[in-house]
Image (spheres, rainbow, N blue to C red):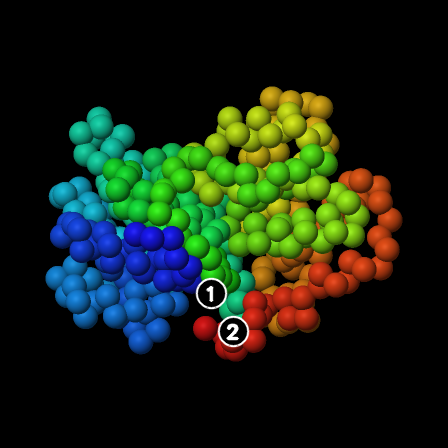
Amino acid sequence: MQSKKFFFYEAIKKITLRNIKRNKKVLLMGLGIDDPKGVFGTTLKIHKKFRNQVFDMPTAENSMTGFALGLATSGFKPIIVHQRVEFSLLSIEQIFNQISKWHFMSGGKVSVPLVIRLIVGKGWGQGPQHSQSLETIFSHIPGLKVVAPTSPDNAYWLLNESIKDSNPIIFFEHRWLHNTYGEIKKINNYKIGKSIIEKRGNDITLISFSYSIIECIKASDFLKKNYKINCEILNLLTLKPLDKNKIIQISKKNKKILIIDNGMTEYGISSEIFTIISENNRNNFIQRIGVLNAPIPSTVSLAKYYYPEAYNIAKKVLKMFKIKERGNLNKLLRINPDQPDKSFNGPF
């Protein structure tokens, strides 16, 4: 495959198709998998070509997940798709108490090569029940691997790695990433459990994942141009297992570290990273920001206070350096914090 540019949703669809074509044991299933919008475009029309491997499922998430578990332990490689992470909560018992433990309870004799795609994140009108980023909950469970890509390139290759893996994978896709655009390289530079440095800098390190990396890059570019602050950005990509060695390594480079959580900070991913750094290098000045620890509002007037955007990141960095704002920080403010672009024009 030549290096070409694709949308994030196209990357998900292309690598799914590639695996379905190559391996008849790869199955795709989910509620609305054959919907006219194709789960944000990621499954669009796949069912028309591979009717024996693609299944629209009834509104019975727990049963669907148990069905997928049985297939996975019988030599198949199912991919479950939930259009909202909240839908998967109806199958938590299957995921936490069965899927994650099957390999352990069988003494390593039975593997569960299952991928569960969960779509998270904010979005116009989604409100408290459909906008949550619940990566922390799944990362807490032994036996699960948790992946959270940022670009079309790492989404493509990490989903490929997830499908090939013999362990159950929770694959998080932030809703606002689906229409981002970028190159998919010919060579796979990603492995589950390994992070990457998105940008190098010698003043402060920003650590984040998923969509929040996009906001980190915006803030970093602004800080370099206007305040001569060079940020290093570490993209975690995998939340379970965390790339602890890389986290410890980068903590020795820059004394100041800001962790930007894609979800809530209390009991979150940022807490774990904070602990890893503190236990191994006590010379760092560490701060963190994330989603406000409260139910997510539906109204735009409240949403602007809720999410960790480039404005909040840049403002926090300036505070850590004890640099006074010069009034130009407002350039980073998004007019509508619940709308990534003008094409995003409805609750769904």
Picture residue at 78% right of the left edge, 58% below the top = 329
Location of residue 4 with respect to 233 vertically, above or below: below
Q: Which residue is mark 1?
A: 179
Give the left or right position of residue 253, taking residue 168 as reference: right
Residue type highlighted by circle 2: Phe
Give whichever of discs 1 and 2 has the lower sequence position.
Answer: 1
**Camera-side residue of 166 and 138:** 166
Picture residue at 58% right of the left edge, 59% below the top = 295
- Asked if labels 2 and 1 touch by Cβ distance under 8 angstroms, the answer is yes
**Camera-side residue of 336 and 2:** 2
Tag 1, which secondary structure?
loop
Residue type highlighted by circle 1: Asn
Give the left or right position of residue 317, taking residue 75 as reference: right
Report the disc number at residue 344.
2
Residue 333 coordinates in the image, percent (x, y): 71, 63
Residue 259 coordinates in the image, percent (x, y): 63, 41
Q: Residues within 10 Å of mark 2 (few under 14, many from 20)?
A: some
Picture residue at 62% right of the left edge, 38% below the top = 200
